[in-house]
Image (cartoon, rainbow, N blue to C red):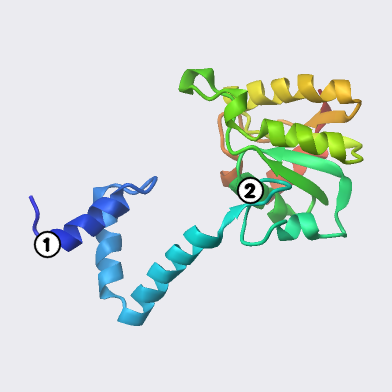
Amino acid sequence: MNYYGEVVARLIEELSRLPGIGPKSAQRIAFHILNLPREKAFDLANTITEARKTVKYCQVCQNLADADPCHICEDEARDRGMIMVVEDPRAMAAYEKTREFKGLYHILHGAISPLHGISPAEIKIKELLTRLGGEELHEVVIATNPTIEGEATAMYLSRLIKPLEIKVTRIAHGVPVGGDLEYVDEATLARALDGRREL
């Protein structure tokens, strides 16, 4: 039943479509937005619109960025001979917080999962291989999540990269199996990076 009018009901419905937001949270967020001063609510709406219009994939690493290439790929101080492969931008951000990794990144935007219908063609593997053919690399660190899908993706990538005579390493399993990298603390991530091994 619609208690608040059509526009408020539509706002709650749209917010409830966001991941991790149920009907009660959507209602709470909607009321918060409606109670903001008008200029703050419009700033929020404008920021969402601007982000949707301007944010795109970096042509080099596939990170979400408002510049192309992104600021990480542009950073000349980074070790350009090392690429860490992660599943999504949140995992990359988690590693950046450790300040331990000095190389570049490649974001796959997913992991191979036949159960969910995600094949290698549906994630950014082709872009990675194109990159590996054009850069002087000494190591690719595979930092996919320690899940069945992440492990399958790591093994698949290892088989593709090894013939290119580039060292392939996998992060150590200091990260809990079945977990997502974005929820792991910096110290555990740093230990996992230090304990990486060749595949």
**Quadrant in the picture for residue 177:** top right
Compute the Cα span from label 2 to label 1. Answer: 41 Å
Q: Is residue 137 above or below residue 185?
A: above
Q: Position of residue 67 (x, y in %)?
A: 66, 61
Observer able to see residue 171 = no
**How busy is the neighbourhood of tag 2: few (under 14 within 10 Å), some, or many (20 plus)?**
some
Relative side of 153 to 37, left or right = right
Q: Quadrant of the C terminus?
A: top right
Element type at marker 1?
loop
Name the foreground residue: 150 vs 137. 137
Name the kind of residue labelled 1 in the image: Tyr
Disc number for residue 4 = 1
Element type at marker 2?
loop
> Mark 2 or mark 1: which comes first in sequence?
1
Disc number for residue 185 = 2
Q: Position of residue 53 (x, y in %)?
A: 50, 60
Name the kind of residue labelled 2 in the image: Asp
**Quadrant in the picture for residue 157:** top right
Observer able to see residue 103 = yes
Identity of the residue drawn at 37% across and 49% down: 18
